[in-house]
Image (cartoon, helix red, strand yellow):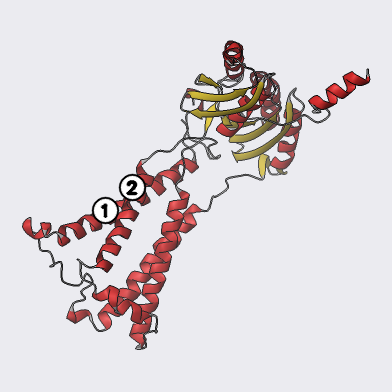
Amino acid sequence: MSARSGGSHVSPQLLSRPRRAVPVTLLGIVLVAVGVIAAVLGGMRLAGNLPSWASFLAGAPRSAAWNSPWGWIGFAVVAALALICLFAAILPGGVGGVRLRPGAGASGAGGREIVMTDADLEGLVERSLLARDGISRATAQREGTRLTVTASTTVADPERLRETIDRELAAKVDSLGLETPLTVKLRLR
Amino acid sequence: MSSGRMSRGGGANRARLAVVGVIALAAALWFIAVCFRLARRWGLRAPEPSTPVVSVPQSWSGSVLSWILLGGGVVLALIGLWWLARQVPRSQRIRRYGISSDDSGRVEVSTEALAGAVAGEVSSLAGVAEARVRFFGALAEPEMLLQIDVEDRADIPRILELLETEVLPDLQRCLGAELGHLGVQIRTGFHVEGESSYVPEPAGIEASAQSK
């Protein structure tokens, strides 16, 4: 947001990049499962009675050579895990919404974070188009600072509508008071 | 961009994923280096590709291995549980603000009551269908999250202006403190109660025209 939203705050941020909670939760579950199995095995081994399911681990997978099918299966699993974790850690992910300018007359104190999710913005644009005469279908999608709107018309020559719809869409998006203006790209069919 | 606690949780998760990813990548590269005898060619001590991947030293075959399994398993499970616990969102929501405190007593205001008053005032603005409010922080630096459901024709900049010039001054006067942070989420596609949303079908229009 603008400089007005600077500084830390305890309330949740409304627009933020993905927290990666799902991959970390899955990793946590895997760690707990592997840890519990290892601890149970160790404990039962100390007590002198290995469970029957442990014989599988002591069999083929344990004695498998590096250059064997089991070895390559293990390699594939570890390599996939590495790629998934590294991509999830490096790729920033989208914020899923746009920021709006604070209302006129906002006082100088305190930060402001005024947002609208992509779903709300796209829905608003789609509905405003559908309410217009001559439009039978409309979809909108924001990516970065570009809003791509695809609309199907019921008129024989869609080009006749283009200029009016283009102007209306630009005015609609402008009227929201977005902090970073969006470039509207219209595709008429 | 402001730095809330949520974003700090995201940073920690990325660090966890990066650590696991680097370890897994190193293991995968070591596997390739062993299988294609690259490690030996580079002068590293590496096993033969035909030897077992899991080779437990003879001296470990007794209770040492069992203790390693037990200890390592407990450590892994604890790390996993800690990671899982960190994924549960912690609410910093506050239930009441202490307005004043002296020998005669303490005056508190319920944030639920405040939220109701603010939501009511915001809901009365033109084009607003509903509003929800939550408070955070402390009276020294109160924070507020506001969700405003608006109809599609609403003048959003005007709503935000009225929020700043009418609603927030009232709230800040009541609290005796300026808001440290305000988060507003605007949701679209709602209908304001009492307004007609009926749009006649084209067939209905034709029928009524014929009847005339």
User: Residue A103 bears which disc, if any?
Assistant: none
SS category of the residue bearing label 1: helix
Q: Is residue A60 above or below residue B48?
A: below
Question: Crowdedness of circle 1 by 10 Å Cα count: few (<14), some, many (20+)?
Answer: many
Chain for numbered disc 1: B
Residue B154: quarter of image? top right
* Residue at (12, 64) in percent of width and height: B46
**Count of numbered circles on the image:** 2
Label 2 packing within 10 angstroms: few (<14), some (14-19), many (20+)? many
Please state the chain letter of the residue tagged with numbered disc 2 in the rendered image.
Answer: A
The quadrant of the image that shows the C terminus of chain B is top right
Q: Is residue A68 visible?
A: yes
Most foreground residue, B150 or B104: B150
Q: Position of residue B170 (x, y in %)?
A: 71, 26
Q: Is residue A112 visible?
A: no
Say whether residue B172 is left or right of residue A76. Answer: right
Residue type marked 2: Leu
Checking the image for residue B25, the label placed there is 1
Is the residue under label 2 in contact with that under label 1 (CB below 8 Å)? yes
From the top left corner, tell me how far across and down residue A105 is, in percent. Answer: 62, 16
User: Spatial distance from mark 1 to mark 2, Cα to Cα?
Assistant: 9 Å
Q: Residue at x 51, y 24 (%)?
A: A147
- Nearer the observer, B89 or B17: B17
**Extreme residue in the right direction:** B212
Task: Give, as a three-letter code, the residue at label 1.
Answer: Leu
Could you tell me which secondary element the residue under label 2 belongs to? helix
